[in-house]
């Protein structure tokens, strides 16, 4: 009888612990695999199949990793999150929709690394930044979307970094870009594009202050073979400031284009060559550039040395 009483006491003490445990606890790190299953808990030994399946099981500010190569599908991110995949091809293959949508709060970040995002010629945007705090894209390949490879259009103040990323074959007709920064009404976007290759898009890099303010630093990058402009900047309701350093703009219709408005474009230590038109509009030079070998070079305004 005494043993039964002790067991009953132990069970009585333990049951509140069980009932207070969360029914669907989220992990700080989850895993996906090409042979996974979204019914799994997304652990290393029982990975999920898709990013969409893993995200609901990943805690805010958590991380999704890839165990092996696979196609992991489109996903919408509404919280701080890292998706980092360096174990072979981590594919996001979409048709008629967006690849990765960031729709977080102003304090949230999204860090993407090692992804191959393919639009099949009918996907809309590879990465769409609708809302959040900061977007970091590193070591990714984004190609064949009808809109833009990366589109930043938040209506608040946001930041971004695109690092060591190739953006290829995006846009259709006269619209779309490899990377397009166009804040919504009242918004602003400030960021850096570093060691990027934007090739064979409609526009390579487009900084557009039509609705809000844009500040972009482009460093150590290549804008080549784009249908209209390798790098284009414009503004109307907002202001646009673009600083281009150690960058090549070659074999575009226009290498570097300031298309008007409250727009400042400054270039240093860069090569603009092999374009139909080298530069267009007001483009300022630190006198350390090579502007030649274009159908028409255009002119740059020298920036006085200080």
Image (cartoon, rainbow, N blue to C red):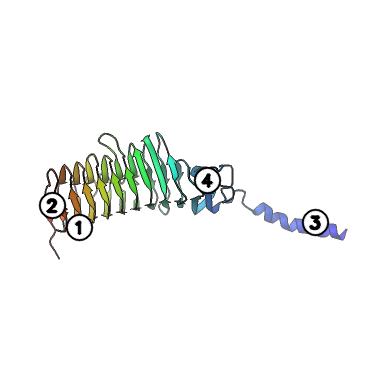
Please say if the residues under marks 4 and 3 sit with CB atoms less than 8 Å apart: no
Residue 299 on image: x %, y %: 11, 50
At 29% from the left edge and 42% from the top edge, which residue is drawn?
177
Residue 134 on image: x %, y %: 38, 53
Residue highlighted by disc 1: 269
- Left or right: residue 51 versus residue 151 is right
For residue 111, the mark is none
At numbered mark 3, what does the secondary structure look like: helix, strand or loop?
Answer: helix
Whichever of labels 2 and 1 marks the residue nearer the N terminus, that label is 1
Residue highlighted by disc 3: 8
Whichever of labels 2 and 4 marks the residue nearer the N terminus, that label is 4
At numbered mark 4, what does the secondary structure look like: helix, strand or loop?
Answer: loop
Residue highlighted by disc 4: 33
Whichever of labels 2 and 3 marks the residue nearer the N terminus, that label is 3
At 41% from the left edge and 45% from the top edge, which residue is drawn?
116
Whichever of labels 3 and 1 marks the residue nearer the N terminus, that label is 3
Q: Residues within 10 Å of mark 2 (few under 14, many from 20)?
A: many
At 16% from the left edge and 59% from the top edge, which residue is drawn?
288
| Cα distance between the residues tagged 4 and 3 | 44 Å
Please say if the residues under marks 1 and 4 sit with CB atoms less than 8 Å apart: no
At numbered mark 1, what does the secondary structure look like: helix, strand or loop?
Answer: loop
| Cα distance between the residues tagged 2 and 4 | 51 Å
């Amino acid at each position: 009888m005494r043993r039964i009483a002790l067991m009953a006491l132990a069970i009585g003490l333990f049951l509140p612990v069980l009932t207070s445990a969360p029914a669907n606890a989220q992990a700080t790190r989850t895993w996906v695999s090409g042979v996974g299953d979204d019914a799994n808990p997304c652990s290393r030994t029982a990975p999920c199949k898709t990013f969409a399946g893993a995200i609901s099981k990943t805690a805010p500010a958590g991380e999704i990793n890839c165990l092996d190569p696979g196609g992991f599908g489109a996903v919408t991110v509404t919280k701080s999150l890292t998706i980092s995949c360096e174990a072979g091809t981590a594919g996001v293959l979409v048709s008629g929709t967006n690849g990765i949508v960031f729709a977080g709060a102003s304090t949230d970040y999204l860090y993407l690394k090692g992804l191959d995002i393919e639009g099949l010629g009918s996907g809309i945007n590879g990465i769409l930044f609708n809302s959040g705090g900061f977007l970091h894209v590193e070591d990714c390949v984004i190609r064949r979307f009808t809109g833009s490879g990366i589109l930043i259009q938040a209506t608040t103040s946001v930041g971004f970094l695109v690092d060591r990323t190739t953006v290829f074959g995006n846009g259709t007709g006269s619209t779309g870009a490899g990377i397009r920064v166009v804040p919504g009404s009242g918004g602003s976007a400030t960021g850096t594009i570093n060691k990027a290759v934007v090739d064979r898009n409609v526009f390579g890099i487009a900084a557009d202050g039509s609705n809000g303010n844009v500040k972009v630093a482009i460093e150590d990058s290549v804008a080549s073979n784009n249908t209209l402009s390798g790098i284009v900047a414009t503004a109307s309701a907002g202001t646009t400031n673009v600083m281009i350093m150690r960058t090549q703009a070659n074999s575009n219709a226009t290498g570097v284009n300031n298309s008007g408005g409250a727009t400042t474009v400054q270039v240093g230590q860069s090569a603009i060559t092999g374009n139909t038109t080298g530069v267009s509009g007001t483009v300022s030079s630190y006198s350390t550039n090579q502007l030649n070998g274009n159908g028409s070079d255009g002119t740059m305004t020298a920036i006085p040395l200080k």
